[in-house]
Image: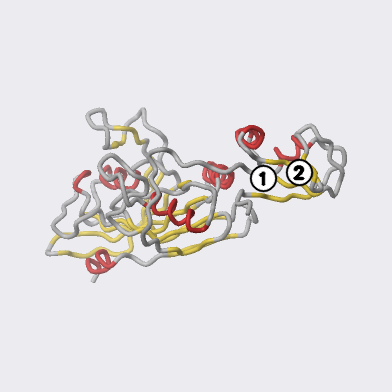
């Protein structure tokens, strides 16, 4: 059975080159090169054609993408995944805390990407794990994975157009004074660290909205429960912005938080909204806070 990913389109312009139609259908030049040289296929009304073929209105075009290969460092592993949504294009998962999204030198196994590759293998899917929305190892909640390189390309376009929206909830040290505020502060790598980021003038543009949900005391210490809307997706963005505000996340000892209440940063991706990359249908997913954060709120 051919497990390659195939999309079908109907030509709506008389006399248009197949190459021009593929561009309008958002097939990237990189994908076309892979189709030509790595085992893909272009067909018109069931007959193999090249990109110089002239289309007639109503022609039925098939685009078959080549099988994808995993990188050498991404081993296939099997384990539990909490699937929130799945179809032929995307996979939305609810990630627990203390699990990496992709393998690293410190945590080379049992990452989401490793387990997704194992899951795809069980499905007979000739693909690898394409992470659309990544979460830090100790952050829990929703993340999206594209099942194919072309879908990853489409979701990348959506992200650049700010058409993928994520909301997080967190518990931070201190009482945040303003009920709502926008933090617009560029983020870059800290010179003295390969891991830490900081707000710095030569950093990348970063924008986070902060809404206060509740101010309370934990062991006589003031803390605030906040909702955070990401408008950009910089590494450690929420953690850096809240520390910059003077309110590091509870449990985030990398950025000034304390771990005496929880053994990881108290941060959870509670909602993910996007348009389906193929159909354009609005999708909205939600996730309840993990038990460790719920316990702090009680």
Residue closer to the observer: 240 or 127: 127
Mark nearer the N terminus (1 vs 2): 2
Q: Say which residue label 2 marks.
A: 43
Mark 2, other Cα within 10 Å: few <14 / some 14–19 / many ≥20:
some
Can residue 209 be seen in this snapshot?
no
Q: Quadrant of residue 244?
A: top left
Estimate the x, y position of residue 291 in percent, counting from the top left.
27, 68
**Can you tell which mark lies on residue 64?**
1
Estimate the x, y position of residue 233 in percent, counting from the top left.
42, 44
Query: If the image is split into quadrants, where does the N terminus sit?
Result: bottom right
Residue closer to the observer: 147 or 1: 1
Mark 1, other Cα within 10 Å: few <14 / some 14–19 / many ≥20:
some
Residue 48 sits above or below residue 133 on the image: above
Q: Quadrant of residue 188?
A: top left
Left or right: 38 with respect to 239? right
SS label for mark 2? strand
């Amino acid at each position: 059975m051919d497990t390659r990913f195939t999309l079908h389109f109907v030509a709506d312009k008389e006399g248009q080159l197949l190459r021009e139609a593929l561009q309008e259908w958002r097939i990237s030049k990189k994908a076309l090169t892979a189709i030509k040289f790595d085992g893909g296929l272009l067909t018109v009304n069931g007959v193999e054609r090249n990109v110089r073929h002239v289309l007639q209105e109503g022609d039925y075009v098939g685009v078959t993408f080549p099988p994808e290969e995993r990188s050498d460092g991404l081993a296939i592993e099997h384990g539990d995944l909490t699937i929130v949504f799945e179809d032929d294009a995307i996979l939305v998962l609810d990630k627990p805390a203390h699990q990496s999204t992709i393998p690293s030198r410190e945590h080379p196994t049992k990452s989401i990407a490793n387990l997704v590759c194992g899951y795809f293998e069980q499905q007979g899917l000739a693909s690898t794990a394409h992470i659309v929305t990544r979460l830090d190892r100790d952050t829990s909640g929703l993340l999206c994975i594209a099942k194919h390189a072309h879908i990853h390309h489409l979701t990348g376009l959506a992200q650049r157009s700010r058409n993928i929206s994520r909301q997080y909830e967190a518990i931070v040290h201190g009482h945040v004074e303003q009920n709502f505020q926008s933090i617009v502060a560029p983020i870059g790598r800290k010179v003295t660290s390969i891991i830490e980021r900081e707000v710095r003038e030569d950093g990348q543009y970063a924008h986070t909205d902060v809404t206060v949900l509740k101010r309370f005391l934990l062991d006589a210490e003031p803390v605030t429960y906040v909702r955070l809307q990401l408008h950009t997706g910089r590494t450690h963005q929420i953690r850096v912005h809240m520390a910059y505000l003077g309110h590091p996340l509870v449990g985030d000892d990398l950025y000034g938080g304390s771990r005496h209440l929880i053994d990881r940063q108290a941060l959870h991706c509670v909602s993910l909204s996007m348009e389906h990359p193929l159909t354009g249908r609005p999708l909205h997913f939600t996730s309840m806070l993990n038990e460790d954060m719920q316990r702090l709120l009680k």
